[in-house]
Amino acid sequence: MERLTSPPRLMIVSDLDHTMVDHHDPENLSLLRFNSLWEHAYRHDSLLVFSTGRSPTLYKELRKEKPLLTPDITIMSVGTEITYGNSMVPDHGWVDTLNHKWDLGVVKEETGKFSELTLQAETEQRPHKVSFYVDKSKAQDVTKELSLRLEKRGLDVKIIYSGGMDLDILPQGAGKGQALAYLLKKLKSEGRLPLNTLACGDSGNDAELFSIPDVYGVMVSNAQEELLKWHAENAKDNPKVIHAKERCAGGIIQAVGEFKLGPNLSPRDVSDFLECRVENVNPGHEVVKFFLFYERWRRGEVENSEAYIASLKASCHPGGVFVHPSGAEKSLVDTIDELRKYHGDKQGKKFRVWVDQVLATETNHGTWNVKFDKWEQSGDEHRGCTTTVKFTAKEGEGLVWERVEQTWSEESELKKDDSSWII
């Protein structure tokens, strides 16, 4: 967040399961469409926030399974934990807020008296969240009785039922909505209140997100009955909250366009890369465009055309250098030449490429250093490289690639197999 010297242009606050992530989409195409849009147009001046019911343990598991971007802020455990950045530094002010009229021991004692409640996994029990499964037919009665008992014990709690089975007990001051309100207040006090905020969700525990004043909201097309019912009863006349026609991340992209919050054409929706141009020189756009082309080239989804190879070589400095993760150096032009023999080698296979955390720094006028993580999924394996690119702006020709240097990411699998890593 320190990179932002002015208020973020847009802050997207999104639930993960069945909102940002479509578990019915084995190719993860809607998520990858969002990824390329975010890195191309928003990463440099906006904030990405994931707001999930998942605990830190389950959140990290999802990151290994799906091509998720790295958010600037993570709100976990149904709004009871807020962390910042890659290292997920906790917000201690939020912890202090949640301690008011909360006693974990008393909550466990009272819930233990309900045979209808089945405790969720140990990883889902957090300092400010106790989680159960309960049959849908019994949820309303259990919630009512449990609320009365905890109130008598002097606690001020909130009980959230979502997904037709999950029951979470939190401090009254917790929840996805309160976490977002706290975050907006904090950003405002720092002079960094986003110009626009878009909340995205699909289930009951996301309803609070849409209740925050001045926030846009999108319920994805696959939103659950409980959220649609809440909307009909509480927000049907609010023009700032829509029910998207597209599923999951596709619905988020749709909302960005409908609310006119910024660009909403994902580079993945552009078919001809030779026609893919932006008005302003944008290193993020160049990086996203190149690696998306690389994916399509290897999947055999673009024509094996000399025009493409010539265009790529023209965008490389004649003396440009590529440093492979193994440490070997070769010319950028030779690296592009080598691409010829890999055309279609991943055709019909599960092969995807995406970039994450594309951040550019202008070192001199017209010279850029861009750092990002580049990931490949081949089958069920993920491999990633931390990548640094030096660009120079050439009048009339856009950005020229001068140097590309890669090192294996710590999370990368199969680091020792260098032979199949091209760029």
Image (tube, helix red, strand yellow):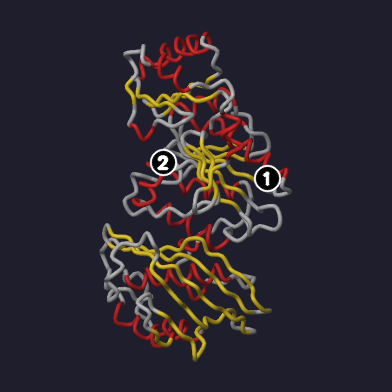
Name the element at disc 2. loop
Which three-letter amino acid code belongs to the residue tagged 1?
Leu
Give the x, y percent position of residue 390: 54, 78
Q: In this view, does 184 lie above or below 163?
A: below
- 180 relative position to 6: left or right: left
Camera-side mark, 1 or 2:
1
Of the numbered discs 1 and 2, the one sitting upstream in the chain is: 2
- The residue at the point 59 percent across, 81 percent down is 392
Give the x, y percent position of residue 225: 44, 28
Q: Residues within 10 Å of mark 2 (few under 14, many from 20)?
A: some
Of 394 and 107, the residue lying toward us = 107
Of 3 and 208, the residue lying toward us = 3
The disc placed on residue 17 is 2
Res. 44 image quadrant: bottom right
Give the x, y percent position of residue 308: 43, 81
Which three-letter amino acid code belongs to the residue tagged 2?
Asp
Give the x, y percent position of residue 104: 46, 23
Q: How crowded is mark 1: few (under 14 residues within 10 Å), some or many (20 or more)?
A: some
Residue under label 1: 187
- The residue at the point 49 percent across, 45 percent down is 251
Separation of disc 1 and disc 2 at Cα?
26 Å
